[in-house]
Image (spheres, rainbow, N blue to C red):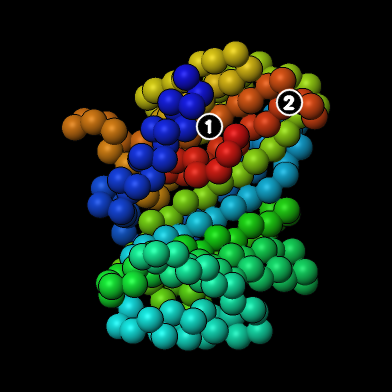
């Protein structure tokens, strides 16, 4: 069942390029969920571990030589890794800024006989506070965001741990009360629970799951791990391993 859930999520991610509903730009509303999720983790006395923001979109590339040029413009001091396959060329950059306590990863996958390329930007960090949020906002309004042809698909995620097993049903109930989440679907397995829902106050990307319903949040709880338990909350879906 867990494998089926993961497959469903992977299929859903591939579907996002044509089905994600984008809100109107209103400041950096995309980061509001991270503030709320962090506050919830503090309320539940969970140990915060990491946040992640991911943006992805197809961009237009006139010539194959343009791809490394784009990456060098964005990260002039980083080294580019290249992976050549039969029909695609993949370019990667990993940039770890110790001063900002953030890690950035940029990848561009270019089909050899196409002018379209898949561009993905991921930034992660191990702290969350007003200073980190301000730095992240600046990065989002700088050159990286402008390299996307349109409004990219936007994902946020935050992870916490507990040294004990978590009562997942109670945690979900507490999160519903905290966020006014409308619960839509759930998957229950031994030591694992995931919930999909919708939070109306968040002006973020959403994904239709039926003609009448759409989701903009997933919450996963995994117990029975060596260190205890993981809690991961992502918008509009989870794009990381549980």
> Image quadrant of residue 135?
bottom right
- Regarding residue 216, the answer to whether it shows in the image is no
Q: Neighbour class for label 2 at 10 Å: few (<14), some, many (≥20)?
A: few
- Tell me which corner region of the image, top left, top right, bottom left or bottom right, holds residue 93: bottom right
Looking at the picture, tell me which residue is in the foreground, 122 or 24.
Answer: 122
The CA distance from mark 1 to mark 2 is 17 Å
Do callouts 1 and 2 mark residues in contact (Cβ within 8 Å)?
no
SS type, badge 2 = strand
Q: Which residue is mark 2?
A: 225
Q: As rendered, which of 110 and 120 lies closer to the eye?
A: 110
| Callout 1 crowding tier (Cα within 10 Å): few <14, some 14–19, many ≥20 | many
Q: Is residue 72 above or below residue 7?
A: below
Q: Residue at x 19, y 32 (%)?
A: 211
Q: Hey, which residue is sitting farthest front in the picture? A: 86
Q: Position of residue 87 (x, y in %)?
A: 36, 65
Q: Is residue 60 left or right of residue 175?
A: left
Quarter of the image for residue 241 reads top right
Q: Residue at x 39, y 23 (%)?
A: 185
Report the residue marked by disc 1.
219
Q: Position of residue 192 (x, y in %)?
A: 59, 21
In terms of sequence position, does the residue under pointer 1 or pointer 2 come before the other?
Answer: 1
In the displayed structure, would residue 125 be above or below residue 169? below
Quarter of the image for the C terminus: give it. top right
Can residue 197 be seen in this snapshot? yes
Residue 56, label in figure: none
């Amino acid at each position: 069942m867990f494998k089926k859930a993961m497959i469903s999520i992977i299929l859903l991610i591939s579907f996002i390029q044509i089905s994600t509903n984008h809100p109107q730009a209103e400041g950096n509303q995309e980061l509001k969920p991270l503030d709320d999720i962090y506050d919830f983790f503090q309320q539940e006395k969970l140990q915060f571990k990491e946040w992640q923001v991911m943006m992805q979109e197809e961009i237009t590339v006139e010539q194959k030589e343009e791809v490394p040029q784009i990456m060098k413009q964005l990260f002039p001091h980083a080294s580019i890794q290249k992976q050549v396959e039969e029909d695609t060329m993949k370019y990667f950059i990993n940039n770890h800024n110790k001063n900002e306590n953030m890690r950035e990863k940029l990848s561009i996958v270019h089909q050899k006989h196409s002018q379209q390329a898949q561009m993905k930007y991921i930034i992660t960090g191990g702290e969350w506070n007003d200073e980190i949020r301000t730095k992240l906002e600046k990065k989002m309004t700088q050159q990286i965001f402008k390299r996307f042809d349109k409004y990219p698909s936007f994902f946020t995620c935050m992870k916490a741990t507990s040294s004990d097993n978590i009562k997942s049903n109670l945690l979900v109930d507490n999160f519903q009360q905290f966020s006014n989440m409308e619960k839509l679907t759930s998957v229950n397995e031994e030591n694992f629970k995931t919930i999909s829902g919708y939070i109306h106050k968040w002006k973020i990307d959403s994904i239709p799951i039926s003609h009448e319903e759409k989701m903009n949040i997933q919450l996963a709880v995994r117990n029975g791990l060596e260190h205890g338990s993981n809690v991961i909350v992502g918008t509009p879906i989870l794009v990381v391993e549980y």
